[in-house]
Image (cartoon, rainbow, N blue to C red):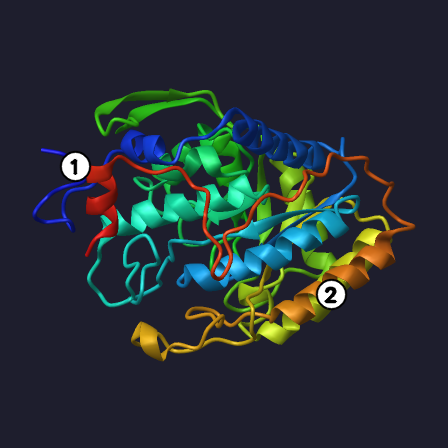
Amino acid sequence: MSPFSSDDAKSWLPSPQELKNCYPLSKDLKAFIEKSRQEIKNILLERDHRLILIVGPCSIHDLEACREYASYLKDLIEEVSDQFFILMRVYFEKPRTLTGWKGFVTDPHLDGSYDIAKGLQLTRQFLWELASQKIPIATELLEIMTTPYVDDLLSWGCIGARTCTSPLHRQMAAGLPFPVGFKNSTDGNITNAINGVIVASAPHAFMGVDEKGMLKRISVPGNPNCHLILRGGKFESNYDLASIQKALIELSAAGQSRRLIVDCSHDNCGKIYERQMPIFYSLIDLIQKGHREIKGMMLESHLFEGNQTLSHPSQLRYGVSVTDPCLDWERTQRMIHQAYKQLQNTLPKQSCLVYAPHSRTHQGQQSDRPKCGAASERSLLSQ
């Protein structure tokens, strides 16, 4: 029986290899993703003087709105590419402290139907579209079983505050071919994240699932490009200079490279999305003063500001987050442009290859994505 044509579509899932065959990487696409990964590594290793910016919605729930956002971000990427290396934040899974919507992969219809097969298919399709437009992709690596479906499309990954102590996530990060950031715990503890960086840098062997969906022993070499992310804690933020210096001291004491990324959202802004702006500007000021251990920042941004309660899809406002509140696109763009001007006389100019614009999938335009086989397409896309 085909994994795409079960009577119970909610239970039977395609293997990672089957979905990768539906949305394969061309030679050009592989080259772009590898180049993006290498540029991030070069920034972390101080071979590239640009800053990493990870910008995008808190979570993905409406692909059309995210396609529109991506089209605007694509233009911005090209405008500021000599100072910033921008990735789109594409979070298709959401960790929950208690309960709630678990993200697009798990519940793509936003109705509790948990059509994971459709969620996996649509997620890979969307990531394929973004990468084909030469937009580097960043995401949180939450569900270990999901990662093999999308790992070849990612340029950067994150282990979140609720999973930074997980041995399984640390082992997974050790085998990934792209840089991975570890966020400090929700209580503000940075030691847990630094320990995650240490563990993920070492080789491991463990039981896992291969791309065919079969259990096997997996051996990984360790990931030398892991790093710390400061995202604030329940009781205090950690984006200020004193907190950053404290983190750098702890990294040095642990024998790790003095480098980190700062998340301007979450507990650093106290979930008050407008505070991301002064936090971002304060970090730009620190970088301008010579604190180059700050390798980049993260921002939560959508087409329109704020957030909304998750309800029936027909009742949702277009381009507004259904999870954490976000900055609107206009302010995001203005903020990055201002920072770009501020840093023009601070950061050395970076000569970098800018890819020509690619055909976009955007409100009414057709995607040039490859097609699955007829049976696979019908099963994956039909309700």
Q: Is residue 271 above or below residue 90?
A: below
The circle drawn on residue 335 is 2
Find residue 157 and report its horizontal and vertical position in percent: 50, 42
67 and 61: which is toward the camera: 67
Relative to residue 331, is residue 88 drawn left or right? Answer: left
Relative to residue 224, is residue 341 drawn left or right? Answer: right
| Residue at image point 68% right, 53% down | 75
Q: What residue would you read off at disc 1?
A: 3
> Badge 1 local density, few (<14 within 10 Å), some, or many (20+)?
some
**Mark 1 is on which residue type?**
Pro
Find residue 172 and report its horizontal and vertical position in percent: 40, 34
Q: Is residue 294 above or below residue 98?
A: above
Q: Is residue 105 above or below residue 323?
A: above
Say what secondary structure mark 2 lies in: helix
Find residue 345 and report its horizontal and vertical position in percent: 92, 50
Relative to residue 311, is residue 10 drawn left or right? Answer: left
Image quarter for residue 242?
bottom right
| Residue at image point 52% right, 24% down | 27
**Mark 2 is on which residue type?**
Met
The quarter of the image holding the N terminus is: top left
Find residue 38 and report its horizontal and vertical position in percent: 63, 30
